[in-house]
Image (cartoon, rainbow, N blue to C red):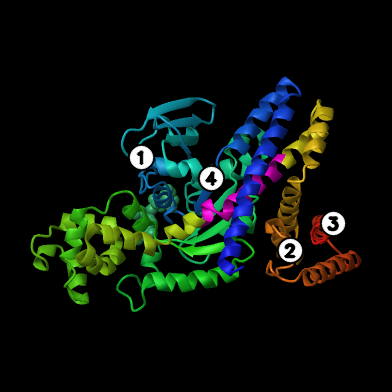
Amino acid sequence: MNQEHQIQSASAHLSQRVSDLTLLLTQAVDALAGGSPDLAARAEQLRLMVTRPPRVAVVGRLKSGKSTLVNALTENLIAATGALECTMAVSMYHNGAPARAEIHSVDGQMARIPLNNGPLDSLPVPLNEVDYIDQFLPNRRLEELTLIDTPGTATLTVENEQRTRRILVDGQRDTRRASGWADCLVFLSDSAPREDEKRFLSQLGMTPLNTVGILSRADSFGSGAFGSIDPLQHARQHANSIQKKLVSTVQQTIPLSGLMAESALTGKVTGDVARQLAALAELDRDDLLDFLEADDPREVVAGFSANDRDDLLDVMGEYGVFAGRSIAAEGGAPALVKWMVETSGVSELVHLLTGDITYFAVLQRAARMLDVLDDLASNHPDMNHIRWVLSVTLAQPGMHFVLLYRSYRNTYASTPDSRLLQLLRTAVTAGHPADTVNLPRDTPVDQVRRAIEEQIAELQQLSMSPLSAAEDEARERLLGSFQSALQATI
Ligand SMILES: Nc1nc2c(ncn2[C@@H]2O[C@H](COP(=O)(O)OP(=O)(O)OP(=O)(O)O)[C@@H](O)[C@H]2O)c(=O)[nH]1
Ligand SMILES: [Mg+2]
């Protein structure tokens, strides 16, 4: 089997697992609801959590391009960008009709505003009374993913950071808010993340498996469009070096131009834009710089007002103008849009978010659900019913992967440099005995067995060395997992 086939079939078995797990968790919720009226109410929140599309929280520094990315992902101008007050509240984006915003206040009130064209641009209550905003839009991408756009985190904007924390950090501890919990994370940064950002990330309870890093504003990276190195290439190299530093925090770091993706995918790149750009194709570098900087660009290109030029820059950015003009001249708007989507990095992100990340997102929510059940099983008056639900749920074979993932999450939180993490990560995605020991699936079975046996022996040896409580549990789970892989080779 060639490499590509292996990858495809690997993802296919993960998407099957996503459906199996969703069914299993829904059954657990049904069983929980049968307990008492109070449990039924709690079950309702959990049901919303386990049945909705995976929810991606978009977090990052102030003005790092979070809302622009939400627009690019939904191919719709739904998230306000720039300086509006509503960019300072947490907004959740869901698929739904009619298009509307529901503004939830901290006192539990809700105000509904219809959305006709364009994003919500004002708030019906003072910002400091807003808890969060639900926004509904009939949208294909939102059928696959729901999104949480957060106000920028930065020490300069303490209130913004508090609003983000209230939903993403404190909200996690509140089961009445389970339907709002995030299942995975996109973290934007336009340079290497700072210590306070890494600390913030660690408080969100995610793992590197469900966290994607974005090196944002890649089109203006380094010295920008007019520097000696292409900014997108420069960003790609830099993303690789950031990834090396962040390997214990994010699964992958993708360089991205949200601006180019947003413009190309939301219909801003019109025939007029392409024609205007094409008119700049023959300018040399210095003339183009003059054109961009002149008070009156008509001095450089006839018929171009300062407004036209600024509008063009808003749509394309400097790099888009610089590198896109020859493409516009040759192929018009269709070629320009295609180039912008390809260069922006957005396809890579969509592929990741709608692919394997979905599996980790479902594992994350399943692990959360187990936490809730564990907690209720020791604190709720109806604990016998909950213990029954837990025992039936845990006995399902599909839960094996949830328990492995929970072990991964707990080990990551307590011992982030544990060598068991790599083994857990492999075990959680394996769909074939050979996968568990990183061998190709067509490896002779004896060789696979030997590798698994060696792994088991190594794990048994580990009982002699000092391990954290989470590592100890991880070791047990891994032993179980390798033993079943061994059984499966017979
Ligand atoms: N050149 C360039 N500009 C971008 C990019 N993404 C966003 N911007 C611009 O940066 C400004 C801020 O973008 P937003 O998407 O509002 O950023 P944000 O992170 O949501 O900002 P806050 O919510 O206020 O923290 C806007 O003017 C965008 O047009 C990008 O990829 N390249
Ligand atoms: Mg924003």
Residue at image position (27%, 57%) is 334
Q: Position of residue 37 (x, y in %)?
A: 71, 20
Q: CA distance from mark 4 to mark 1?
A: 20 Å
- Residue 436 badge: 2
Name the residue carrying label 4: 164
Report the span colored magenta.
Answer: 352-369
Residue at image position (41%, 44%) is 87
Q: Earlier in the sequence, mark 4 or mark 1?
A: 1
- Badge 4 vs badge 1, beta-carbon distance below 8 Å: no
Q: Is residue 172 left or right of residue 414?
A: left
Q: Residue furthest right?
A: 464
Q: Is residue 118 magenta?
A: no
Q: Main secondary structure of the magenta part?
A: helix
Q: Residues within 10 Å of mark 2 (few under 14, many from 20)?
A: many
Q: CA distance from mark 3 to mark 2?
A: 15 Å
- Amino acid type assigned to the residue bearing label 1 in the image: Pro
Is residue 228 visible in the rendered structure shown here?
A: yes
